[in-house]
Amino acid sequence: MKRISVPILIVFVLLTSSYGGNSNSSVYVIHGIPGGDLGLDAALPVDVAVQGGCILEGFTYGQAAGPIELPEGTYNIKISLADPCNPCSSTPVIEADVPFSAGETAVVIAHLAEDATPTASKFIVSTNCGYSRKFFNHGDDDDDDNGNNNAYGAYKYCNGTKMVLHHTAAAGAVDIELQRALGWWVGSRNINNITNGEQAEVKVFPGNWAISLFPAGSNDVVLGPIELRTEFCSSYFVFAVGSVDSGSLTLLVYKLNCRNGSELEMVGAVVYVVHGIPGEDLGLDPDLPVDISLNGQCALPGFTFGEITDGLPLIPGVYNVKIGLANPANPCSEPAVIEADVALFAGENVTMIAHLTAEGDPTASVFSNKVGKGCFLFKSPLVVHHTAAAPTVDIEARRHRKVLKLENVSNGDQGILNTRPGPWKVSIAPAGLEDPVFGPLNLRLRNRKVYFLYAVGSLDNETFTVLQNVIPLKNLTD
């Protein structure tokens, strides 16, 4: 491995991919550091120039671009803070001459060194996932130089899955643990003593894997477990980025489908946002319009009580969330009523809800939408959340003689009822009592959908109600 050390203010990745017989390199560009580690805007927009030509403008953290076809050679790469009026005109904050050879797959990543100073490293990797072959006639069983089998009557299908793990974070040497549970069987992969600037490649079974990072020789986890779902015939490029000390340590994950090998897809986080505070409970407009900002960027202006967004794709990282009263003339300019730092990881699917505490104060909570490793085939799970100004409650779902219960559910808690498709009646009662304070709510559950219920409002103010969201089950199983 060749290391290139240069002074920088930004992290980027160049993933170059060449296939047999191609004299060019296919270059992907990825922006891989949160700006907060440098005391700058979290998105840290930059302009990227190659050989003096401006190829990317306003490129932000986590974005991927490409492929860009480049003949074999050494290329001068310059990255500068974005200038919307005159792109690529600012003084470069990173400049490096990077060689690319025909037929190689390489990753060049500018990242934080162990001591948190900026640096850059070049990795040589392979995008070949692995193949299985069957033969129905005799022929030459040998592969050619490009790994292709030319036997008469031979056919092959891709069944490989691979992870390429890179230590590119401000941290000392780490041990990486991969675990996969399938019923009673637990599979694991362990890569020990990986130092900053090193990589490890492992072949894995398709399915759900949990990735954890530990200081080398220690059992104290510094990151994870982060669950990653892998698929057949895919390579996953995993980069540990950010800083342990600043709390920004996370994984950036990119998927490359080995069947076509052209699109590099980020494995991001998905977030649903729910407004669960009736304005009456605060003596304000019942709709209580608010503005919501993420890392200083106004994301949801004029968001009103009862609204639920579609799933919002977000880049993994730490987000500073601020919620303030809406200002139509100048969105997100009012003081924050609710503020929190929320860490989102690759592959996560969560709901962020603004709601009342049990005492009636405004707050926000984040709930995972994943329904676990259980088998929910032909099921329609009902996920219930207590996010209301109310004491501990019992939640009951009834269908004919079938009764399912969640008992002693407190504010900020959630529970899953393993319901089947069809009509159900849902009621909420104070813990230990029979008489409901809400319901019965009539629901007709459809197959392979997950139903999320959020109890919101206040019992004392008679604003208590239930909000509902429905998400396909296929997006939420582990």
Image (cartoon, rainbow, N blue to C red):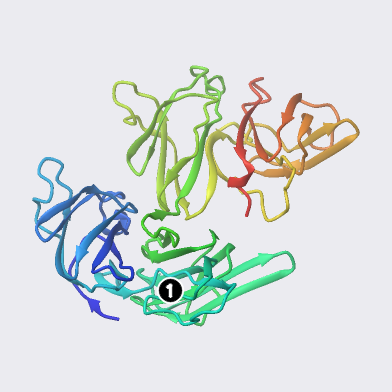
On the rendered structure, is 329 left or right of 158?
Answer: left
Residue 33, compared with residue 364, is above or below; it is below
Name the residue beneath numbered marker 1: 148
SS of the residue under disc 1? loop
**Looking at the picture, how far across and down is residue 455, in whole percent?**
66, 31
Q: Nearer the viewer, residue 408 or 109?
A: 109
- Would you say residue 337 is visible in this rendering? yes
> Callout 1, which amino acid?
Asn
Q: Residue at x 62, y 27 (%)?
A: 457
Total marks drawn? 1
Which of these two is toward me, 440 or 360? 440
Q: Percent from the top left, x then y, of residue 114?
A: 33, 74
Q: Position of residue 208 (x, y in %)?
A: 59, 61
The location of residue 373, given as percent across then percent down, is 68, 56
Residue 338 horizontal side relative to residue 57, left or right: right
**Residue at the outermost right position:** 401
Looking at the image, residue 396 lies above or below residue 477: above
- Locate the N terminus and report the quarter of the image it occupies: bottom left
Residue at left offset 48%, top offset 81%: 140
Q: In the image, is 30 to the left or to the right of 180?
A: left
Q: Is residue 227 visible?
A: no
Q: Tell which of 113 and 123 is nearer to you.
A: 123
Horizontal relation, residue 154 to residue 330: left or right = right
**Dividing the image into 4 quarters, which one contains the C terminus?**
bottom right
